[in-house]
Amino acid sequence: MKKNHPHEYSEIESSSNVPLAQELNFSVSTLSGGQESLLGKYETEGFPKVLLISFMAEWCPNCHYEAPILNGIYSAWHNSGFDMTIVAEYSDLDAWEDRFMRTHGINIPYFLGELNEKNETLRDNIAHTRIRKLMNDQRVWGVPLHILIVYGNLKEACFVTGEFKPGALEQFLKDYIS
């Protein structure tokens, strides 16, 4: 990883005019090789006050930079009504676990996305890309990408196309949980 890779900080934006709900509940792979709906657990057990869904990739320098920060926030806020799930997109399971989760000591639950490698031909046909297009994300691979769902309201979700600006997620959680 490049030490001086430029950051892609982005504002938290509202998606109230974006038809996100129908795209967000796509099928992801579990660690045991099964398939389940990304939001299935929350539809069954109920949504937390704030749910953060983060799309990341093991080869993405910005994801490597941001993951330990998000892990700290997850640890600090998890018992206060905040939950988080990572969708590992464009990443092989072994590389994801070894070079990302273990390297950074990440304790955030995760699923595997629809592609386990970079594939420009298939990229345009997956949920991650459809979601990015709804948000006018023009980046080539679009990771990291974060979606914030407050009180289970998929019609009013917020998103960040890039890294959270320093302190922005913590302030968001204070505003909606505290």
Image (spheres, helix red, strand yellow):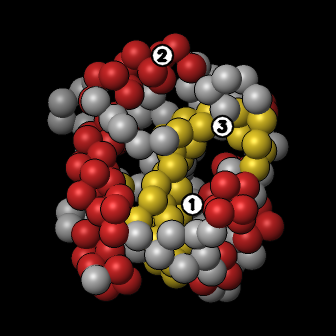
Mark number for residue 150?
none
Residue at 23% of width from left, 49% of height from top?
A: 72
Q: Which mark's residue is nearer the viewer, 2 or 1? A: 2
Q: Quadrant of residue 120?
A: top right
Q: Earlier in the sequence, mark 3 or mark 2?
A: 2
Q: Is residue 161 visible?
A: no
Whole-Å distance between the Cαs marked 1 and 3?
18 Å
As drawn, the label of residue 113 is: 3
Q: Which residue is mark 2?
A: 95
Q: Secondary structure at mark 2?
A: helix
Q: CA distance from mark 3 to mark 2?
A: 14 Å
The percent position of residue 102, horizontal first and vertical second, equals 33, 22
Q: Position of residue 81 (x, y in %)?
A: 41, 70
Dividing the picture into quarters, in which one does residue 9 lie? bottom left
Q: Which of 144/124 is in front?
A: 144
The residue type indicated by label 1 comes to: Asp
The reply to whether callout 2 and callout 1 are in contact (CB within 8 Å) is no
- Circle 1 Cα neighbour tier, 10 Å, few/some/many (<14 / 14–19 / ≥20): some
- State the residue in front, 2 or 25: 25
Q: In the rendered structure, which disc, 1 or 3, sits on the residue that comes first in sequence?
A: 3
Task: Name the residue type under label 3.
Answer: Gly
Q: Going by the image, does 43 lie left or right of 65?
A: right
Query: In the figure, 174 relative to 63: above or below?
Result: below
Q: Residue at x 70, y 70 (%)?
A: 20
Tell me the residue that label 1 is attached to: 137
From this viewpoint, is residue 97 visible? yes
